[in-house]
Image: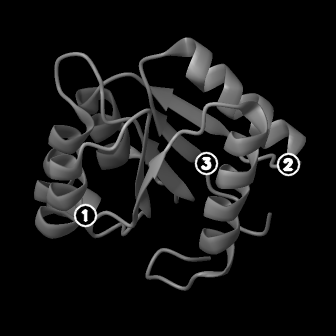
Amino acid sequence: MAKSGPFILIEDDPDDKAILEDVLNELNITNKIIWFTNGQQVLEYLKTTTDKPFIIICDVNLPGQNGLDIKKQLDKDYHVSIKTIPFVFYSTNANPDFVTEAFTKMNVQGFFVKPSNYEGIKKQVKAMLDYWEYCKHPNSN
């Protein structure tokens, strides 16, 4: 992969994290994965890092602050929002109200439902990363 920035993964389930790491390894993706379980952690990281993250992949169903609330918090912080990091939701379900809110009230670039099998996850993640590999946006290398 040409873009070398880290992947930001906001996910509370260690099993889902492990599956995503396995998929990335199988796809020969060597980008560092930085795992957060809540919005405050990721906000503090993004405010202080000089890294240019490749993508933020965020679960919607998180304890305490859900993924939509996290994205709203990131959008409100000027120093984070100007980094223009691609942000996608990746969740086990897609409540139509959540999907509508994600696309009409915040800056998201995708909303994906996690497939129920490993090969489906691998195919979906590859498509997601291939798109952002070639897409031009203000944060692209």
> Crowding at label 2, few (<14), some or many (≥20) Cα neighbours within 10 Å?
some
Observer-side mark, 3 or 2, equals: 2
Relative to 101, is 137 above or below? Answer: below
Q: Which of disc 1 and disc 3 is earlier in sequence?
A: 3
Residue at 24% across, 16% down = 63
In depth, the one of 126 and 92 nearer the eye is: 92
Q: Going 59% across and 39% down the picture, which residue do you hit?
A: 115
The residue tagged 1 is 81
Residue type (three-letter) at the residue carrying disc 3: Pro
The local crowd at label 1, few if under 14, some if 14 to 19, many if 20 or more residues have their Cα within 10 Å, is some
- Mark 2 or mark 1: name the one nearer the start of the chain: 2
Q: Which residue is mark 2?
A: 27
Q: Say which element carries label 3.
A: loop
> Which amino acid type is marked by label 1?
Ser
Is 132 on the left-hand or right-hand side of 126? left
103 or 93, nearer to the observer: 93
Q: Could you tell me how far apart the alpha carbons at marks 3 and 1 are, in whole angstroms?
A: 17 Å
| Vertical relation: 31 (above or below) 63 | below
Q: Is residue 45 above or below residue 16?
A: below
Q: Position of residue 121 (x, y in %)?
A: 68, 41
Distance from the alpha carbon under mark 2 to that under mark 1: 29 Å
Whether residues under marks 3 and 2 lie with C-beta atoms below 8 angstroms apart, the answer is no
Q: Of discs 2 and 1, which sits in the foreground?
A: 2
Look at mark 3 in the image and give the residue it sits on.
6
In contact (CB < 8 Å): disc 3 and disc 1: no
What's the coloring here? one colour
Residue at screen point 48% across, 74% down: 139
In the rendered structure, the answer to whether residue 34 lies left or right of residue 101 reads right
Q: Are marks 2 and 1 in contact (CB under 8 Å)?
A: no
The quarter in which the N terminus is drawn is: bottom right
